[in-house]
Image (cartoon, rainbow, N blue to C red):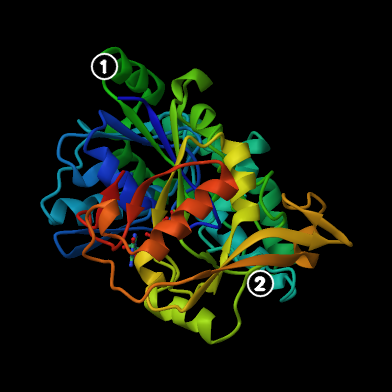
Amino acid sequence: MSNTVIVGTQWGDEGKGKIVDMLAQEAGAIVRFQGGNNAGHTLVVAGEQCILHLIPSGVLHPGKKCLIGNGVVLDPEVFLKEIDGLNAKGIDVSPERMMISKKTQIIMSYHRMMDNCRESVKSDESKIGTTGRGIGPCYEDKMNRIGIRAADLADPELLRAKIVEALIEKNVLFEKLFNVEALDPEKVYQDILPVAERIKPFLGDVSSVIQDVNKAGGMVLFEGAQGIHLDIDHGTYPFVTSSNTVAGNAAAGAGCGPRCLERIIGILKAYTTRVGSGPFATELLDETGETLQANGHEFGATTGRKRRCGWLDLVIIRETARLCDLTEFALTKLDVLSGLKELKICVSYEYRGEKISYPPQEQNGMAFVKPVYESMPGWEEDITGARTYDELPEAAKNYIARIEELSGVKVGIVSVGPDRAQTIVR
Ligand code: GTP
């Protein structure tokens, strides 16, 4: 089995969780390589729903190693809460199978506080729509080289000194700019100590585990969060997340070389959704948009926010395919399109008087593109019971074929419902 990377091809919420969960059955280890607890994977197993924000979705498979890579920012309290919740459901998440890289950055209370302070002083137009979980400020400290890394939790003196250092500038901002009380470094330190004690047994060398799994002939599954168009460099900047979501970052964020990444699956929702602010060329502000929102239950798993909905945008998908070198798509939520008479696919954009096949690279360029659509007939049939490709209606097969033609990437997996069983592998 080839090492496999899973990425979201759009703006997140494509249903990565379900596909990761499915492929985890064949994996020796599952590793998360970027983002934090702003991800929200919803898994349904035998009718039971389970939402995970931080822990790799593969955790539901007994015995599989679940790894948190160095590219992740980890909120230790959220991590422990998820572990406790899973243990209470009888799912083993002991340190024997769960590991946090010693190099993983730790989200501290002051990161969450900074996130909320920053967003509160922004104008409505410039709000990024962050989830307020401290993820951006934690990545900032990492780049600023004052971040707390997981291994520091096992070194009390270093930890105390680093907290003091990290708060020097922040306390000035809290007091002078945001008019909130400065934090006492000693209190922050004392508060984190019991948490650190519980995190310690999970610390390890994730990079070596990946190598060992491969040496023993096992497959490693790299689980991406969010989507390619939220990538800090390649997304619709500045309405993006604070990490690289592209497939290449699976190597850097997990601790292996690029040749380790063999199969790259892009999770593609059959239509487009976006949470929060930012340009969205194919957004539907009409009844069809509402139908997609209602039929697809498009509410954020983490924030509960209503997702904006629109037609499938092949321009951004084409960009994803080239940025990530996708080897195939897993097409999800095809069932949600059932009942729509006409389906539209955006095949190119009109931008400053020209027709373009890839998104413009200028900031705000995406806000000025006009989608050029192709129209296709929809299908009436309920397809949630289809288990083979041949059982799909002709119109659904044509839709899939057109996606493949327009992107140059084959659709290897088709998902027709939230359950593990509602999946067609071609
Ligand atoms: P992020 O990492 O936050 O982007 O999460 P995600 O990509 O895993 O998506 P999320 O779990 O938030 O949303 C997907 C939702 O769609 C979940 O409620 C899934 O149970 C559901 N889902 C997944 N595949 C299908 C499908 O083929 N059909 C339908 N109807 N629902 C699906």
Please state, as top left, top right, bottom left or bottom right, where the N terminus lies in the image: top left
Report if the CB atoms under discs 1 and 2 are less than 8 Å apart: no
Q: Is residue 328 above or below residue 134?
A: above
Does residue 193 appear to the left or right of 285 in the view shown?
left
**Mark carried by residue 145:** none
Residue furthest to the top in view is 215
Task: Give residue 349's position: percent from left, percent from top.
Answer: 74, 60
Q: How many marks?
A: 2
The type of residue carrying mark 1 is: Gly
Q: Is residue 202 above or below residue 255?
A: below
Given the image, on which type of amino acid does mark 2 rest? Ser
Does the rendering let one see residue 138? no
- Picture coordinates of residue 378, whole percent (x, y): 45, 72
> Could you say whether the residue bearing mark 2 is in a helix, strand or loop?
helix
- Residue where numbered disc 1 is placed: 217
Give the residue at the far bottom of this rendering: 287
Q: Nearer the viewer, residue 425 or 160?
A: 425
Residue 274 falls left or right of residue 319: left
Residue located beneath label 2 in the image: 120
Q: CA distance from mark 1 to mark 2?
A: 50 Å
Determine crowd level at label 1: few under 14, some 14-19, many 20+ residues with C-alpha closer than 10 A.
few
Q: Residue at x 62, y 38 (%)?
A: 323
Quick check: can you spot residue 296? yes
At 46% from the left edge and 26% from the top edge, which residue is drawn? 261
